Amino acid sequence: MPASDKLVRWIDLITALLRRRYPVPFAELARDVPDYDHDGAPSEALQRMFERDKDELRRAGIAIETVAGPDGEPSTYRLRATAFYLPYLVLQNAARAPVRSSGAGYRELPTLALAPEDAAVLRRAAERVQALEEPALTADARGALRKLRYDLPELTEPAGAASTSRDASVFPALVDAIERGKQVTFTYHSMGRDATESRTVEPFGLVYVTGHWYLIARDVAVEGVRRFRTSRMQTVKVNTKAPATRDFIAPPDFDLKQYAQARQAWALGSGDETQITVRFHGADGDVMTARTIGAASDGFDAAHRTFAVRRRDVFLRWLLSFAGDAVPVHPPDIVQAWHTLVQQTLTAQPLTAEVA
């Protein structure tokens, strides 16, 4: 059975449980989950499928309860909304009511009141964690920021699209340069090298990715297309020579959409790209999601995916998080570095694997 079919069934099951505020038997749940309902009479085989789904969802952190009947035998099931959703966030003494969904499952949720200064600290902490670009933490930090932005828009508005740059003149200057095809010079702080230096670029477009605006431009010095976060730019100057004439023309094959996609931490940076082929085992949600990030691998079957990697050490640590369900098979130096990393992890040695 395709993993997508199981995912749909799980969503149907979770929805059926959340719609009810009381424990219900499997036969009642089956009416709302098409995969469990066979001509209106769920069979023992379908009951076993439900039990497997219930156990897998529990292992994923979804707290489905089994409630015993009058005879002491487990017979009904329940998923409390308070065990599934996070509480609504509000600011202490706020005049605005919390932003609530109208869904039935949300009505039982409590609110959590935060002092404005505490909420601001949480936002800054999540932004800093996200800036670390560590695969194991980035997704959680993004989730925390989405929660804060939804429940407390007045707190996080300054960090949104309207003011992602410290210098208010940066964004209008870049838009003007893009429209007129003029070169731009600015000072830029590179997180990878922790250095600030002058850059001259040919700006192709702006994209908004994971809460930040980026300029997509050809860096004249390195003769390559790069992404520059606008909030790290200062003293942006548009070329004033020949104002009615374009300084450049974007390549005919340039596609801004490909730069509007969120990038993994191991794909960032200015280092050379390495094409790494990985074999995936298993079909749980994390493995299937990871497979979709990579591209089809020439000469390999569908279980293999190829990734364009700039930060090899970060990529190998990401693979390590799959506990053997994602293993690099090419190129040989990456495979060797992987085995070294695994052995160091198993023996609790410092993770100092070098990748040439």
Image (spheres, rainbow, N blue to C red):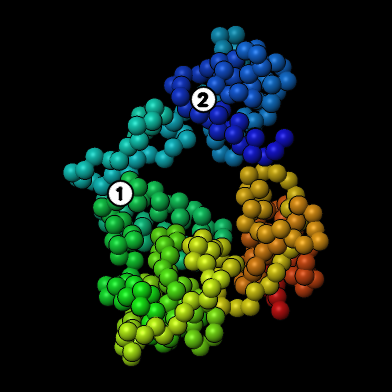
Where is residue 1? Give x, y as percent: 72, 35
Amino acid identity at mark 1: Leu
Amino acid identity at mark 2: Ala
Q: Nearer the viewer, mark 1 or mark 2?
A: 2
State the separation of the CA atoms marked 1 and 2. 29 Å
- Element at badge 1? loop
Write down the quadrant of residue 278 in the picture: bottom right
Where is residue 50? Give x, y as percent: 65, 25
Q: Which residue is mark 1?
A: 152
Q: Which residue is mark 2?
A: 16
Where is residue 46? Give x, y as percent: 69, 21
Q: Which mark is residue 59?
A: none
Label 2: few (<14), some (14–19) or many (≥20) C-alpha neighbours in 10 Å: some
Specify whether residue 343 is in view.
Answer: no
- Element at badge 2? helix
Location of the C terminus (image quadrant):
bottom right
Label 1: few (<14), some (14–19) or many (≥20) C-alpha neighbours in 10 Å: many
Toward the front, the furthest residue is 244
Where is residue 108? Give x, y as percent: 37, 29
- Residue ID at (45%, 51%): 143
Q: Is residue 55 above or below residue 205?
A: above
Q: Is residue 124 left or right of residue 69?
A: left
Specify whether residue 214 is in view.
Answer: yes
First in residue order: circle 1 vs circle 2: 2
- Residue ID at (27%, 72%): 168
- Residue ID at (65%, 13%): 39
Q: Nearer the viewer, residue 85 or 296?
A: 296
Does the CB distance between marks 1 and 2 fall below 8 Å?
Answer: no
Q: Is residue 51 above or below residue 233?
A: above
Q: Is residue 231 left or right of residue 280?
A: left
- Residue ID at (32%, 84%): 244
Q: Is residue 82 above or below residue 163?
A: above
